[in-house]
Image (cartoon, rainbow, N blue to C red):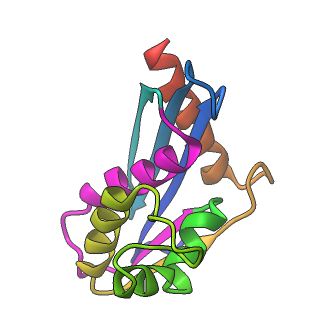
Amino acid sequence: MDKDKIIIYTDGACSNNQSSDNIGGYGAILTYKDHTKEIFGGRTNTTNNIMELTAMIEALKLVKNRMIETEVHSDSAYIVNCINLKWYEKWKTNNWKNSKKDPVKNKELWEELIDLIESFNDIKIIKVKGHSGIDLNEKADELANKGIESVR
């Protein structure tokens, strides 16, 4: 593991996603040098995407020195593609409408995440395969499930 950069793994989860009695959780693990920080939380009446966005937002808020190279690993293609392919730039140009001319879901969370990302000097958002044995990704998943349990 590279000791000179901040490494973050984030994950979101939702039990009974798309139903009215769902419970969501988010989790993240941040590492820098010999320091590790774990966070998690949960809420009712949410979605998996909201929890994925919340995990990344809450993790990035904890980074005090945004001049340090930072890598954020997520198994959410939704988030990674939006950031890396800059879908959000078109959304902004189109008054927060997607390619189907529908309002972008979770606009406020996207705005917060984009602002956070843009506040970093050197940040990379990296797609990882979920549930594939990557230790820190598995830990982020555990924390997201712990978030769900904290609400039950």
User: Residue 14 in the image: x percent, y percent?
Assistant: 60, 34
Q: Position of residue 75 (x, y in %)?
A: 65, 59
In the picture provided, is 57 more to the left or to the right than 67?
Answer: right
Residue at 58% x, 43% y is: 48
Does the magenta-highlighted stretch encompass residue 129?
Answer: no
Q: Position of residue 104 (x, y in %)?
A: 45, 65
| Most distant residue in the front direction | 101
User: Looking at the image, which residue is at 42% across and 79% down?
Assistant: 91
Q: Is residue 78 above or below residue 70?
A: above
> x, y percentage for residue 86?
49, 86
Camera-side residue of 43 and 108: 108
Residue 52 to residue 39: above or below: below
Which span is picked out in magenta?
46-73
Residue at position x 65%, y 66% in the image: 77
Q: Quadrant of the N terminus?
A: bottom right
Q: Is residue 23 left or right of residue 92?
A: right
Q: Quadrant of residue 129?
A: bottom right
In this picture, is 69 found above or below 74? below
Residue sticking out furthest to the left: 64
Q: Residue at x 49, y 78 (%)?
A: 83
Q: 67 or 108: nearer the eye?
A: 108
Which residue in the rendered view is the most extreme toward the top?
152
> Residue 50 magenta-drawn?
yes
